[in-house]
Amino acid sequence: TLALGQTTTCTITNDDQQGTLVVEKVLTQNNGGTESYDDFSFTIDGGEAIPFDVDGVNEIALDAGTYDVEELEFYGYTTSYEGCTDVVVTNGGEATCTITNDDIAPKLKLQKVVVGGPLAANAWNLKATGPTTISANGGVTSGPTFQAGEYTLTETSANGYAIHYTTDGVWS
């Protein structure tokens, strides 16, 4: 209420709100991977490492701007990004970056080496038994895509030959 001849000032102040950057983790573990979301970390514009929350979703309040999100390299998983480069966060807005990790299937090569004697490699049957079983009737086989885990390696025996295992896993 103003009286005649009175002067007053009204000030309205606007303060910009921070926006939210949502960094989501998608974890595909179809080859025996056992990691959890919080085993992985990421950076924003190369800053400090930020571990993923246990549910795989981090909501980070940031000033309006453009940001790059990158995950720290994690052995045994491939990494792909969706919407993680030049992410625009607006005042009061929300932007999402999705990082997907897929566990890499291990590979196992069964190879028989025969030292001396008349028998060829195909006289033995090699077998790897575990979460996935592969076998090679002598010679060499590269196993199919299979699950990570513990394996027992066996072979059929041949009269007059002893089995020796080398440190690189090759039978001889």
Image (spheres, rainbow, N blue to C red):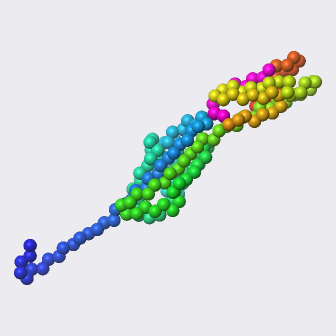
Q: Quadrant of the rendered structure where residue 140 is? A: top right
Horizontal and vertical percent position of residue 169: 76, 31
**In this view, 148 is above or below 74:** above
Q: Position of residue 117 (x, y in %)?
A: 93, 24
> Which residue in the rendered view is the most extreme toward the right?
118
Q: Residue 31's x, y, as percent?
A: 61, 36
> In terms of depth relative to the viewer, which is nearer, 10 or 109?
109
Is residue 142 inside the magenta stretch?
Answer: no
In the image, residue 73 sits, relative to residue 154, either above or below, namely below
**Residue 8 located left or right of residue 69:** left
Residue extending farthest to the bottom is: 5
Q: Quadrant of the C terminus?
A: top right
Q: Position of residue 145 (x, y in %)?
A: 68, 37
Residue at image position (12%, 79%) is 7
Magenta region includes residue 151: yes
Q: Residue at x 89, y 18 (%)?
A: 160
Residue range highlighted in magenta: 146-156
Question: Is 83 placed left or right of 167 in the picture?
Answer: left
Can you name the residue that lies furthest to the top here?
159
Q: Is residue 20 visible?
A: yes
Vertical placement of residue 143 versus 2, above or below:
above
Residue 103 occupies which quadrant of the picture? top right
Front residue of this view, candidates 99 and 65:
99
Secondary structure that dominates the magenta span: loop
- Report the residue at 66% width, 34% height from top: 146
